[in-house]
Image: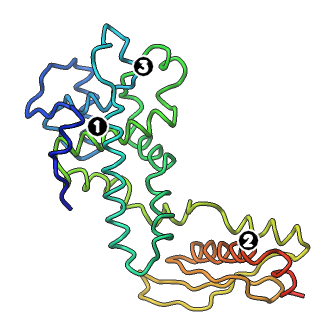
Amino acid sequence: MKINKSWISRFKIPILKRRSREYSAKDEKAFAHIYKTLQYQFKNSDLLALALKHRSFMGVNHNSHTESNERLEFLGDAILGLIVTEFLYEKFPAQSEGYLTEIKSLVVSRKILTQVARKIHLGDYLYLGPGEEKSGGRQRISIISDAMEAVFGAIYLDGGTEAVKTVIHRLILSGLDDILENGLNKNYKSQLLEYTQAQGLGTPEYVVEAESGPEHNKLFQISVRVKEKKWGMGHGKSKKQAEQQAAKDALSKINHQGRRHVLWSIF
């Protein structure tokens, strides 16, 4: 995947081969920690420093003339979306556009970005204004998730597509199976259980219909049944994931066919 850098110049973010300024020992220590956790060494530390600058810092120490990380965040968001889209397209060749869109929205969500940012303690190294500092800005979801995207944008400008792709794979995409299993959109099983109990239909039963693939890479096909009637089918790399998809299928039928139709088919 290649991205033409000609349009990047429109962002007016300085792309320098060497640092244009010296940093304090505290800053250098912060940069060293970030390099280690990202497993990426910036050639231009100015880009990393810019990625860490929240807009609240602009009025501190006469910094109003400098730039915040918002433009880098904008760039990083686009880069992240492109890399995740390409990865999902290649990983799930048989899945529909709708399914891929659903997965992508979760992978690039603020929730996942926040988890990654907290894992590498990114909030500890942000440049914040005094007010934002006192109000807990270092742990604020909107601030640290945006900063994570800005860091991705900075890595792209500093090292190119392959560099940022490697970092995104390591921090996010390597854990895709866990992301899908633990947070694919909603807990459909709980929603279906609430519905069936409210209708006096008891607890849904999940039945393994088929298993395929080698032991280390199995695919499960599971149905969900209510009063011995099959309501939905699901597939997944784990039983938990397949059950969620089966419950989602059942809920989709309830929404599209109407509750009366579904209930009538049972009795």
Type of amino acid under label 3: Ser
Mark 1 Cα-neighbour bin, 10 Å: few <14, some 14–19, many ≥20? some
Q: Amino acid at mark 1?
A: Ile
Residue at the (21%, 32%) spot, across then down: 13
Q: Which residue: 49% across, 20% down? A: 132
Q: Give the labeled residue for mark 3.
A: 56
**CA separation in Å, label 2 and label 3:** 45 Å
**Residue 201 picture location, percent across and down:** 88, 77
| Vertical placement of residue 32 versus 208, above or below | above
Q: Quadrant of residue 73?
A: top left
Q: Quadrant of the C terminus?
A: bottom right
- Residue 163: give x, y in percent of width and height: 20, 51
Q: First in sequence, mark 2 or 3: give its number.
A: 3
Point out residue 252 in the picture as x, y percentages from the top left corner. Answer: 68, 73
In the rendered image, the quadrant that contains the N terminus is: bottom left
* Residue 91, placed above or below residue 126: below
Mark 3 vs mark 1: which is more N-terminal?
1
* Quadrant of the rendered image containing residue 127: top left
> What residue would you read off at disc 2?
255
Q: Are marks 2 and 1 in contact (CB under 8 Å)?
A: no
- What distance separates the C-alpha of mark 3 from that of mark 1? 21 Å
> Which mark is nearer the camera, 2 or 3?
2
Q: Residues within 10 Å of mark 3 (few under 14, many from 20)?
A: some
Picture disc at residue 34: 1
How far apart marks 2 and 1 lie (CA) works out to 47 Å
